Amino acid sequence: MFTIKGRYSGKVYNITWDNGKIYGDEVLADVIKDYIEAKEGEPVGFPGYYFTDNHIKNAFSSYLILRRFFDEVIEESGDIPAREENPYGVCD
């Protein structure tokens, strides 16, 4: 579980991801769920380490998408997902 506090359209929101569920301001949480679902099929991550599907269930994908969603990230807390160091033995 992690929470991102960020600015979106001039307002500050706290959005929490917990095992594939998005919590926070009800209206914005629904918008973010739709935004994440719209990214299905798109690579999210880094060269050699990315995901293309089921982003809402993947902590790393959701984290990266949420960071891009906000106009400004103010604070992060909780279990912030980290990229594994070269997990598949490929060059980045």
Image (tube, rainbow, N blue to C red):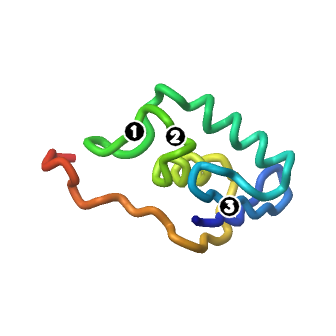
Amino acid type of the residue that numbered disc 3 sits on in the rendered structure: Thr
Amino acid type of the residue that numbered disc 2 sits on in the rendered structure: His
Residue pictured at 44% horizontal, 40% vertical: 44
Residue pictured at 50% horizontal, 54% vertical: 59
State the image quarter where residue 10 is shown. Answer: bottom right
Mark 3 is surrounded, within 10 Å at the Cα level, by few (under 14), some (14 to 19) or many (20 or more) other residues, namely many
**CA distance for labels 1 and 2:** 7 Å
Q: Secondary structure at mark 1?
A: strand
- The first of marks 2 and 3 along the sequence is 3
Q: Residue furthest front?
A: 19
- Give the answer, above or below, for where 82 lies relative to 90: below
Q: Are marks 1 and 2 in contact (CB under 8 Å)?
A: yes
Q: Count the numbered circles shown.
A: 3
Circle 3 sits on which residue?
Answer: 16
Mark 1 is surrounded, within 10 Å at the Cα level, by few (under 14), some (14 to 19) or many (20 or more) other residues, namely some
- Give the answer, above or below, for where 23 lies relative to 58: below
**CA distance for labels 2 and 3:** 15 Å
Residue 47 placement (x, y as % from top left):
29, 41
Horizontally, is 21 left or right of 41 in the view?
right
Residue pictured at 21% horizontal, 55% vertical: 86
Residue pictured at 54% horizontal, 54% vertical: 63
Mark 2 is surrounded, within 10 Å at the Cα level, by few (under 14), some (14 to 19) or many (20 or more) other residues, namely many
Circle 2 sits on which residue?
Answer: 55
Q: Are marks 3 and 1 in contact (CB under 8 Å)?
A: no
Circle 1 sits on which residue?
Answer: 51
Question: Where's the N terminus, which quadrant?
Answer: bottom right
Horizontally, is 30 left or right of 82 in the view?
right
- The first of marks 3 and 1 along the sequence is 3
Amino acid type of the residue that numbered disc 1 sits on in the rendered structure: Phe
State the image quarter where residue 78 is shown. Answer: bottom right
